[in-house]
Structure formats: structure tokens, C-alpha cells
Amino acid sequence: MKVFVFSMLRAARRGACGLARSLLIFAMLSSPAFAEAPQSRFAEVNGQRIHYLVAGKGDPIVLLHGYTQTSHMWRPLIDQLARDHMVIAPDLRGFGQSSLPRDGVTKAEMAHDVHALVASLGLSSVKVVGHDIGLMVAYAYAAQYRDQVSKVVLMDAFLPGVGNWKEVWLLRDLWHFHFYGATPLALVKGRERTYFEHFWNDFAADKTHSIPEADRKLYAASYAREGGMRAGFEAFRAFEKDAADFAGFAKTPLAMPMLVLTGERASGPVLINQARLAASQVEGVIVPGSGHWLMEEAPQAVIPKLVEFLK
């Protein structure tokens, strides 16, 4: 009888501990501190198939990636922002898993794609963040849909057509902005990673603290799909048209708050100065010791600053 009672008590204790653990796990997963993993989705918008990541609920934020990367670059930031916001990170047209155009697409046209995606999700006003090519699309979005953007963030590159844009740091190696057509495509076919190493290594303050190895493999494979490199090259071919578009946009400065983040050993004050020609409320921050790849080189400084500004 004693053995039976002891067994029953031990089973009850095990059950209580199991229930307690279940309740603890439920509470942890229900807490805002544990954001949901982003979902991978596709949308048919603006005549294009756009792939995007989405996570969280609340005030919406759109994250726009740059060249050599895809929406994947934003995952560490999505984890933080999705605790309090709905976060949408698309692959721009011509990149990742989105449609690959045969002809060039301007940054203003890419912004139309993103706006159509936002509208398809039933959203109106958003905050927009862009890095590299993505910052050009973010600016074009804010300039074309001014009453639908409450804040904008530009991260390390330049604005074609604004100020002395052809003298910016990223244009020091002008060859790669004219590297398109049949011969460049033949040269990089099967060597996509070798080509991208120029950007990942030479645009970083320290190439050993730049894009992680796993991400390098992922991005190289993404761009290696049929038509991927050609579509990527077209983003450069469009710069002259982008410059004409942006010069027109900048005639009426943006009024919403703008944060500009640059690497000390990359764009430095140049993008900040450009932004002040195109917007009236600019906070400029130069990230000490960082090169172009802000999210990867200086996450401890960059992510908290973005979370704070985007509240």
C-alpha cells in the first residue's frame, strides 16, 4: 500500500512538473521578447512575382536589401523588430526569388513593386529602411509616396543624381558599375562568388568580419540561378535614369524624419550630406570602425539604433 501511494505521489509530481514546464514554455513563446520566425511568401503584384519575408504584428516596417544580398540579410533585425512591428522584407525585382527582368528596372520602378506589395497586404502608411541599392529604392518609395511614409532610413551607399554623386566613395572602382553585357556575364558564370568577394572583402573595414561564410554561399547560389547575374547587373545600368529621377525628387525635400547610417570606412559623411540635400529632417550617424556592410560589421551599434528610431 505504501509503495502504491508513493508511486501515485511521484507520478503526480512528474505531472505537475510537466504541466509547469508546459506553462513556462507557453508563457515564453507568448512573450513579446520571443518574436515569431519570419514566413516566406510570394505575391503577384505590379505584374511581377515578388518574394518576401513577413513577421510580427503592429506598426509596419519595410526592409529593402542591397546588391550581392537578398531579404535574408535582414533576419537578425527582423528578430528584433517583429516583437513590436509587422516587418516585410521583399526580394527586390531582379534579386533573390523575385521575378528576373530581361531589361533594366529603375529604382523608382522597384519602389512601385514594393508599394504594390504593401497595398496587397492592406497597409497604407509604413516606415521604410534600405541598405545599398535598397536605400535608393527606399528613397524612391518615400519620394513617390510621401504621405504614406512616416520614417525612412538610408544605410551606406549613395543617392544617384543628388549633389556630387559621381564622386562618392563607392564609385572609386568605377569598373563594376559598367560591368554588364555578354562578356561580363560569361566571365562570372560559375565564378559568382569570386566576383562578389570583391564587394564583400574590399568594401569592408576588415574582410574577416564582413559577410559570414554561410551567407556568402547562400547569396552566391541565389545569384547563380539562370538570369540572376544579368538582372543584378541591370541595377547598375539604370543609374543614369535613376539620377534623372532622383534629381527631380530632390527638388521637393522629404519632410518625414530620416535616419542615415554610414560606415566610417565607407560612405562616411558623403551620404549624410546628400540626404540633407533631399530631406529636411536628417539624423546622420557615422558608425565607427565599420565599412559598407553595417548589419554584419557592426550589429551591436546598428541594430539598437534602428530599433530605437523605428519605434
Image: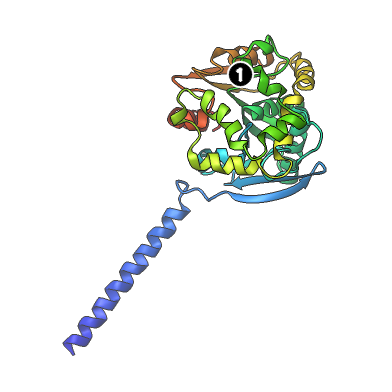
Please give the name of the residue rendered at 50% of the width and 25% of the height, measured from the top-left corner: 204
Task: Residue 195: give x, y in percent of width and height.
Answer: 61, 31
Label 1 neighbour load within 10 Å: few <14, some 14-19, many 20+: some
Quadrant in the picture for the N terminus? bottom left
Report the front residue among 112 and 288: 288
Residue 60, quarter of picture: top right
Indicate left or right for 271 with 207 as reference: right
Residue 98, quarter of picture: top right
Please give the name of the residue rendered at 81% of the width and 41% of the height, measured from the top-left corner: 46
- When the figure is inspected, residue 175 is found, relative to residue 224, above or below; the finding is above
Which secondary structure, mark 1?
helix
- When the figure is inspected, residue 114 is found, relative to residue 152, above or below; the finding is below
- When the figure is inspected, residue 215 is found, relative to residue 12, above or below; the finding is above
Task: Residue 230: give x, y in percent of width and height.
Answer: 74, 35
Task: Residue 122: give x, y in percent of width and height.
Answer: 72, 45
Report the front residue among 20 and 242: 242
Report the front residue among 247 and 127: 247
Indicate left or right for 248 with 33 as reference: right
Would residue 298 be seen by someone viewing this image from the given angle? Answer: no
Quadrant in the picture for the C terminus? top right
Task: Residue 50: give x, y in percent of width and height.
Answer: 72, 44
Residue placed under numbered mark 1 in the picture: 170
Please give the name of the residue rendered at 66% of the width and 42% of the height, measured from the top-left corner: 224
Residue 69, quarter of picture: top right
Would residue 160 be seen by someone viewing this image from the given angle? Answer: yes
Q: For the residue marked with disc 1, what is the amino acid?
A: Leu
